[in-house]
Amino acid sequence: MAVTDAGSVGGQIRDWAYRTCGYTGLKVDTQAQALIKVNAVAAVVFLLLGGLMGLAVALTRWPAVHLLPAEWFYLVLTGHGANVLLFWIIFFEIAVLYFASAILLNSRLATPKLGWLAFILMVVGALMANYAVLRGDSSVMFTSYPPMQASHWFYLSLILFAVGALIGVGVFFGTLVIARAERTYEGSIPLVTFGALTAAIIAVFTIASGAIILIPTWLWSIGLIANIDPLMYKVVWWGMGHSSQQINVSAHVAIWYMIAALVVGAKPLSEKVSRTAFLMYILFLQLASAHHLLAEPGLSAEWKIVNTSYMMYLAVMGSMIHGLTVPGSVEAAQRRNGYTKGAFEWLTKAPWGNPAFSGMFLSLVMFGFIGGISGVVLGTEQLNVLMHNTLYVPGHFHGTVVAGTTLAFMAATYLVLPLVFQREIVWPTMAKWQPYMFGIGAAGISLFMMGAGTLGVSRRHWDITLTDAAHAFEYPAAAYLMMGLNGIFAIMAAIGGAMYILVTVGTVLFGKKIDEAGTHKLTFPLHSGGPQAVSEYGSRGTLKLPGTIILVSIFFTAFVLYYFVNWKYLSDLWLFR
Amino acid sequence: MAVTPPEQRIWWNEPIHKTELGWIVIAFLWGLFMFFFMIAWHFIGEQNLSTETYRIQPAKYEAKVEAFAEQFKVAEENGVPVVRPPAGEDVFILGRLWEWWPILELKKDQSYRIHLSSVDWQHGFSLQPTNINIQVHPGYEHVITLTPTESGEFGIICNEFCGIGHHQMTGRIRVTE
Ligand code: HEM
Ligand SMILES: [Cu+2]
Ligand SMILES: [Cu+2]
C-alpha cells in the first residue's frame, strides 16, 4: 500500500501525491510514476511490433527463405525503422528522463498534465505513422529522401510525434528547475541525471532540425511547396537523424552508470572526467550530418573532414572515456566488494546472473567493439566509399542501437520493474538468460550484415540474386552465407526480444506486488561486500585497475588494426579522384 | 554513486585517476592521428572522392547522355547501347527507374571522366565486385576521374532505395586489357 501524502508547498503549485520508496526512502511522485509506466509500456509495445517486422525483414533477406514479396518487404522495412528506432527508443527515453529527474532528485514532476499531453501526441503520432505505412503508399524508408514522396500522413505523424517528445523534454527541464528551487537534493545533480540532461539538450537541437526539414516536406506532400532539394534535405534531415543517435548514446551511457551504481555500488572514478565526457557529446555533436554524406556530390572534402571529425573526433573521445570509466568504476567497486584476486576476479565474480548487470556489461562491450569501431571506420571520409549504403551500414548501427542502446534499455527495465512498477519479476530464469540471447543475436546480425556489406551487398534490397534485373550480376557465395547466418542470428535476437517482452508484460500484469512494508528482497547495491563497501574511495593513488587497463588495451588494439585493414582494402580499389 | 549527488561537493577539484588521464591522452592523440590521416590520404592515396559537381536540369542531363551514347556506340545488347569511349574522354552514366544506362566498355589503366546523375529519384552507384559506392542525385552532375585497375565484367547495382523496382536496377561496365 502506498503511503500517500500531500505536498505542503503552497500557492500555485499543485498538491502532489507521493509514496515513499521502500528501498531507497526516496519520495516518489505518483504522477511521475504513472507517466514513467505508460511511456515504458508504449515503448515495449512498439518494440514488439518493430521487432517482428525486423525478423520478417531478416528472413526475407535470407535468400533460402525469402519470406516476403517485394512490396511487403519495403513496406515492412519502413515500418521496422520507424517503430524501433523512433518509437521504441524515444518512448523509453522519455521514461528515462522522468526517472532521472523526478525520481533520482526526489522531486515532484513539473506539469504532469503536459506530460500526459506529450504522451498522447506521441501515441497519436506513432499510430498515424503505422497507419501511413500500412496504407502502402509510404514505403519510403524512415529516411524518406525526396524526390520520392510518402503520403502526407507519414510526415504529419512524425511531426506530431516530435512535438510530443519535445514537450516531454520540456517537462524534464521544468522538473530540474523545480528540484533546484525546492532544494530536493544537496550539491550538484547526480551523474546519471547529468547524462540525461545531456540527452535532453541534444534532443532540443535534434527536434529543431526535424521541424526545419519535416514541416516543409509535409507542405510539399500536400502540394503547397513545389520542390524540395534532395541534397539540402539530407543535410538537414541528418541534423536530426544523427544527433538523435547521440541522444541514444547519452541515455544508454547514463543507464550504464545507473546500473553499475545500483547493482555493484559503482561510483564514478572521477565525476569531473565522466561529466566532461558527457559534455563533449553536446559540444561536438557537430554538424554530424556530415558522416552520412561522405559519398554525396556537391559537398567539399574540407567540409566533410572537418565536420566528421571536428579536427579530431571529440565525440568519439567522449565515448572512449566512458568506455574506460564505466568498467573502471565497476572494477573499483568490485575490488572494494572483496574481489581482488588477479586482474579479473572482479569480472568473473560479477553478478552475471542478474540480467540488469549482464545486459549492461554486454551492451558496453558490444557497443564499443562492434558499433563504435565500425562507426569510426564508416565515418572516415575516404573509407566511406567502401561501404556507403551497403549492408555494412545497418550492420554498424545494429551494433550501436540494438546491441548498445536497446540492450541497455532492456537491462534497465529489470530495475524499473521492481522500483517503479513495484512488481517482482516473473520467470526469473527467463529474465536471467534474456540478455545473453538477445545480445548474442544482436551481435550476430551486426557482424554478418557488416560482413555482407564488405562483400558489396546493398542495403534495403529485396533480391540479392538480381533475378529480374536489367543486367545480371552474381554476388560471391560468401555473401549468401553471410545472409543465411544473419537470418539465424536474427531468429536468436527475435527470441531474445520475445523473452524480454514476455517477462516485462508478465511482470506488469501478474508479478507479485511488492509492498512498502519491507518484505522485499532487494537492497541497493544489490551485490556488495557488506558494510565496509559503502565507505568512501576515490581517485586516491592507491586504486589500481589492472583488469580495465587490459580490457581497453584489447579494445584499442582491435580498433587500430581494423582501421588500417580498411585502408588496405581501400588502396586495392580502382583509382578515383 | 552515480545515482546520487557527488559525495564531494567541490567535485571539480578532485584529482583525476592516472589510468583515466593516460587513456584520455591516448584517445586524444589517436583522434588527432585519424584526422590528419584523412588529410594525408588526399596526398598519398589514390582513392579520393572528387567533389566536382554541377547543377543541371535532369532533362538536359538525359540529352547529354543520349548524345554521348550515340557518338561512341559500338553495339547493342537487348536494346541497350554498348558504348566504347576513347581513353580520357568524358563518359556519362544515367541513373533512372530502374537501370544504369548505357553499357560501357573501358580500357584497363586508362582514366575517364565519369559523369553521374539521375533523372528521377536518388540512386546509389555501387560498382561491384570492386565495391565503390557513390550517391547519385537528380539535379546534380557529379564528375569523377576513374581508372579501372583490373579487366573483366563489372556490375553496377543500385544501393539507394528507389521504389519497387530497386532490386532490378543494375548496369554494366566491361573493362578490356
Ligand atoms: C529482432 C531484432 C532485429 C532484427 C532481426 C533486425 C534486422 C534488421 C534487418 C535485417 C534490417 C534490414 C537491412 C536492410 O535490408 O537494409 C534492419 C534494418 C534496420 N533496423 Fe533492425 N533488426 C532488429 C532490431 C532493431 C532494433 C531494436 C532497432 C532500433 C533500435 C533496429 C533498427 C533498424 C533500422 C533503423 C533499420 C534501417 C531501416 C532502413 O534501412 O530504413 N533494428 N534490421
Ligand atoms: Cu536506383
Ligand atoms: Cu535503388
Image (cartoon, rainbow, N blue to C red):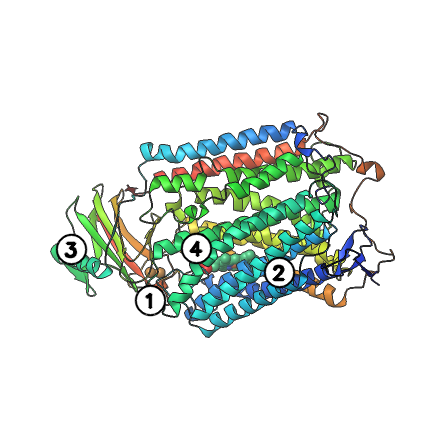
Q: Is residue A59 above or below residue B125?
A: below
Q: Quadrant of the N terminus of chain A?
A: bottom right
Residue A452 visible? The answer is: no
Label 2 sits on a secondary structure element that is: helix
Label 4 sits on a secondary structure element that is: helix
What residue did someone put label 3 on?
A: B68
Identify the mark nearer the N-term, 4 or 1: 4
- The chain ID associated with circle 3 is B
Q: Position of residue A53 (x, y in %)?
A: 53, 65
What residue did someone put label 2 on?
A: A497
What residue did someone put label 1 on?
A: A468
Measure the C-alpha gap from mark 1 to mark 3: 27 Å
What residue did someone put label 4 on?
A: A237
Residue A328 visible? The answer is: yes
> Do badges 4 and 1 share one subunit?
yes
Pointer 2 residue Cβ closer than 8 Å to ligand 1? yes
- Looking at the picture, tell me which residue is in the foreground, B171 or A552: A552
Q: How many marks?
A: 4
The residue positioned 84% from the left and 39% from the top of the image is A531
- The chain ID associated with circle 1 is A
The residue positioned 54% from the left and 66% from the top of the image is A126
